[in-house]
Image (tube, rainbow, N blue to C red):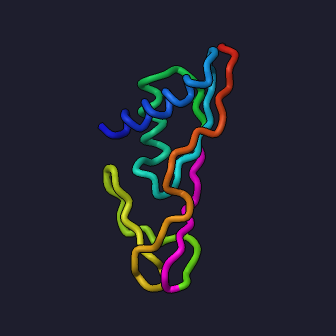
Amino acid sequence: MHEMHLASELVEEARREGGDICEIEAEVGELAPITCEELLEALGKLVDWQVRLSEKQACVKCGCGFAGRPSIVAREHDLVLFKCPKCGRVPKVLEGDAIILKAVLKGGK
């Protein structure tokens, strides 16, 4: 289950902050290999923290000159297929393909 692996990595990153964690905030890229819902479910199996997730829209740049949001062709279990909406080629991802820990709140319940 890659969801658990990705969730575990996020938990480890948060724990490196130290202290009594009560909440985390993370950003999930539109082209990341997991959705916000899948990540939230996996995190719920690992920790009892409050979790706030937001989705980051993807931005790509293509050789044809297009820059902006890609066309998502398919979303599989751990893969997102996308293309340039202008020419159909595979563009370079500028942002929106990662899971980023934005904040770690401490203090207990």
- Residue 15, compared with residue 6, is above or below; it is above
Tell me if 36 is positioned left or right of 75 in this view: right
Quadrant in the picture for the C terminus: top right
Examine the image and state in which quarter residue 4 appears: top left
- Residue 96, compared with residue 91, is above or below; it is above
Residue 89: x and y in percent read 40, 79
Residue 71: x and y in percent read 46, 72
Please name the residue shown 65% across and 29% down the image: 104
Examine the image and state in which quarter residue 66 appears: bottom right
Question: Which residues lie in the magenta part?
Answer: 53-64
Whether 97 is among the magenta residues is: no
Residue 5: x and y in percent read 37, 35
Tell me if 54 is positioned left or right of 44 in this view: right
In this view of the protein, which residue sits in the foreground, 93 or 84?
A: 93
Please name the residue shown 44% across and 23% down the image: 46
Quadrant in the picture for the N terminus: top left
Please name the residue shown 56% across and 66% down the image: 59
